[in-house]
Structures are given as C-alpha cells and as structure tokens.
Image (tube, helix red, strand yellow):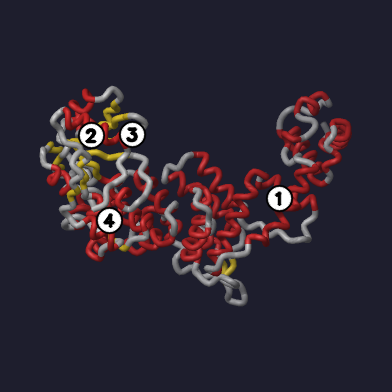
Amino acid sequence: MRAFPIPPALREYARVFKDAGRQAWLVGGALRDMILGKKVNDWDVATDAPAQEVARMFPRVIPTGIQHGTVTVLWKGLTIETTTFRVDGDYGDGRRPDSVTFTSDIREDLRRRDFTMNSLAYNLETGELLDPHGGREDLAAGLVRAIGDPVERFTEDGLRPLRAVRFASQLDYRIDPGTLAAIPRTLENFRRVSVERVRDELVKILLSPRPSYGLKLLEDTGMLPDILPELSACRGVEQKGFHRFDVLDHSFLSCDGAPDRIELRLAALLHDIGKPAARVEGPDGLPTFHRHEELSARGTEEALRRLKFPNAVIASVSHLVRHHMFAYDDSWGDAAVRRFLARTGPENLEDLLALRLADAYGTTGERPDPRGLDPLRRRVEDLLGRSRALSIKDLAIGGNELAALGVPRGPVMGRILAELLETVLDDPELNTSERLLDIARRIKEKYGV
C-alpha cells in the first residue's frame, strides 16, 4: 500500500497521543479524500482518549460537541476534529443519537458510520489501514453504499439519504441499488431534518461538477418535492421552439451550464420555476409563458427564504432570475442600453450574460458560442465610458436642490427625481446642475407645486 502524504504537523499531533499512551486514527472524509488524491483542508481523528483528556493535551481546543466526545483542536495551522471512539444509542429524533457509549475499540466506532467509504481508519503512528466494510473496494468501483442495512442506517439519521446523493454527485459515483432503494422507504425520517442541514447538502450538490446528476437522483428518490416543490412542479411542462426538453430537464441542464458559483447555479436552476403558473396555450396549440420571469423571481425568493439562504444570496439570485429574459439586438439605441443597465445594474452584467449562456445550454444541450454576447458587452463598455449616470443618486442634483426650489419632500419629489433620471438616460449630457434645475422647474409647474 502506498504511503499517505500525512502533513508533518499531523504526525506531531499523533505523537502527543502516543506519548500519553493513546491511539490516533485518521478517519472520515479526510481519509477518503486522501485515498482519492484530493486536497484535504479539515482533518478528522478518532481516539480512545476521552474528550476531556484531549482538551488537556493541547493549548487551543474548541469544545465542539464534548458531550458526544468531540473537540476541535487548532494545532500548527491545522483544524483537527477529534472524537472519542464511540457506539451510538437509539436515534429518537431521527437525526442524532439519544446517547453515546464510549469504547476503546476503533472497529466498534467504524461500525456506526454511514457509508463504507467513510468507514476506513488509518493509524497515524503505525500506518495500519483498517477497512472492515469494504470501503476501498467501493471507492475503486465508484460506489456509494450504506454500511449494513441501508434502511436501518437511514432510519437512524434522516440526513443520510441526502448525503448519499451528495456524495454520488460530488464524486460522480453510482449509488448501490440496495442503498438507493432504501431512500424512498425512509422519506418520513428525511423530512424531520432541519432545513439548514438540507440547504447545506443542496449547495454541495449544486456546486458539484455535474449538478444535474444529483438533482435527477433527488427527483428519482422522491426527495426533490420536499426540498424544492416549485422545481418539481416543472416536470412534464413542455416548451416550444428550439427547446428540446421540458422545463425541469431544461432547468437541470441550465444548472450544469452555469459557472460554479452558488448564486449562478441557483439562478440557472430556478429561472423558469414560474412557467407552470404562467403557461397559456396559444391559438396554434403551442404554450406561451408571458412574464414568467416575474413569477419565477417571486418563487425563487420564497424558496430560498424557506431554505434559509443568506439575504444577500436571495437578493442576488432573485434579481438575476427577474432580468434573465432580456433580448438584446443591434436595434437597441443607446438610451435602451442605458435603461437596461439602470434596471439590472452594470455590476450584474457578467452574471446575467453567464446566466444567458447557461439558459441557452439548457435549451439544446449544446454549448453556445459565448462570442454572441460580445456586441452587448462592447456597447455597455462604450456607454459606461461616456456616462455612468444610471440611478437617482447619480444625478447632478438631489433632494436638497429640489427642496430649495420649493418642492416638498415626499411622493412628488420622488416623481420629479424619477423624471429627471429618465431625461438623463435619454441624454446623459443633460446631467448638469444648471440643466436639471431648469428641467425640474418645468416639471414642478406640471405638478402644481
């Protein structure tokens, strides 16, 4: 067996345990990723030392879950989650054990884990590799397989079915047939998992190399309606024209086509969720989806709030979804381009263009030529080079100057400022105090103030 590239600091960490007469085994995702040749950032160590003893061994320790035998040790630049060998009791809440029993046998500890790929252990002092459940064989075969009875494993912890899909998606592995078949049988337990944990696993699926694979697994196992019912409702909603797929498969593929930033992957996945509600059959029998982007944006905001995404992510994704239907061509005048930028924000242009390319990929399953968006990009660069007045705050005058003209603060002042902005969008050269004050006087007379 090839030697693992264990960092010197981790070997020194293990030596502290040896000097104390204790064991230190590398376990879990850290060992799995090391076997796969992937970069390891966080380290997981299992030991026969009680957590309180581990806490006394090292100067910088965070009591992460000391009641369950876990502490996080900060050691020479490494973050090492260290857990005492244990056997779990019953899982009354379908998520965490009601009790744990600590043991001195690493094999007992490995038996309680979820998947065979996570049930290996490497002794950091002796170099011994334990693999009691065939984890190496499953890694070599590209297989996600539960340890023992998968129904029992998924009944213990309702997050495990979603983790199975996440591992399959991240690693491009198959799920063992017996493990896969157990997921629909344990959905009630999955539904008890906190929304935050579901969200975190979903993010990992969406950021995997080919998210459509994981998303299809979520649909096939019955989990998708519980996570994103708005998306699940898109199955069977057929489209027209160049579209080769129904709305759901189009959304899955669009997600594949987006850059691997969570805001763009979410926008690509959810940009058409308003289509089922917007669908109207035309006189030719073909469906239309007029203004579906507004329904999609509202649905996106509701879905992401339900999943407890950060407010900044919700705002960014819904904004991209709301504006994804722009249809630029050479007939757009300069004022039209400026109004487009005023609506969308120049800072969002590249994300909108990326979403447009992802949408196009989801339409045909073929990568579009990104150079098709260059004309709009060049127009924007040219216009911004001449004027960046795209919002009320960019005007040469503001509320104080209007108040000096006798305009009362309130709705009328807001309407006058909005009209001044429209004027400047039509002709940026008018954005001077003198000219805008003159225009404001005429608008003020119109409103009778």
Most foreground residue, 297 or 113? 113
Most foreground residue, 119 or 420? 119
Q: Amino acid at mark 3?
A: Thr
Mark 3–mark 1 distance (CA, rounded to whole Å): 47 Å
What is the crowding at mark 4: few (fewer than 14 residues within 10 Å), some, or many (at least 20)? some
Mark 2–mark 4 distance (CA, rounded to whole Å): 40 Å
**Is residue 445 depicted above or below 166 in this figure?**
above
**Discs 1/4, front:** 1
Most foreground residue, 347 or 310? 347
Q: Earlier in the sequence, mark 3 or mark 1?
A: 3
**Is residue 190 depicted above or below 184 in this figure?**
above
**Discs 2/4, front:** 2
The location of residue 55, given as percent across then percent down, is 23, 26
Mark 2–mark 1 distance (CA, rounded to whole Å): 60 Å
At 41% from the left and 46% from the top, the residue drawn is 307
Disc ID at residue 14:
2
What is the crowding at mark 1: few (fewer than 14 residues within 10 Å), some, or many (at least 20)? some
Residue underneath mark 3: 79
The location of residue 43, given as percent across then percent down, is 30, 39
Q: Earlier in the sequence, mark 1 or mark 4?
A: 4
Q: Is disc 4 placed on a helix, strand or loop?
A: helix
At 29% from the left and 50% from the top, the residue drawn is 32
Residue underneath mark 1: 340
At 37% from the left and 49% from the top, the residue drawn is 38
Pick the quarter of the image with the C terminus.
top right
Mark 4–mark 3 distance (CA, rounded to whole Å): 34 Å
Residue 234 seen in render:
yes
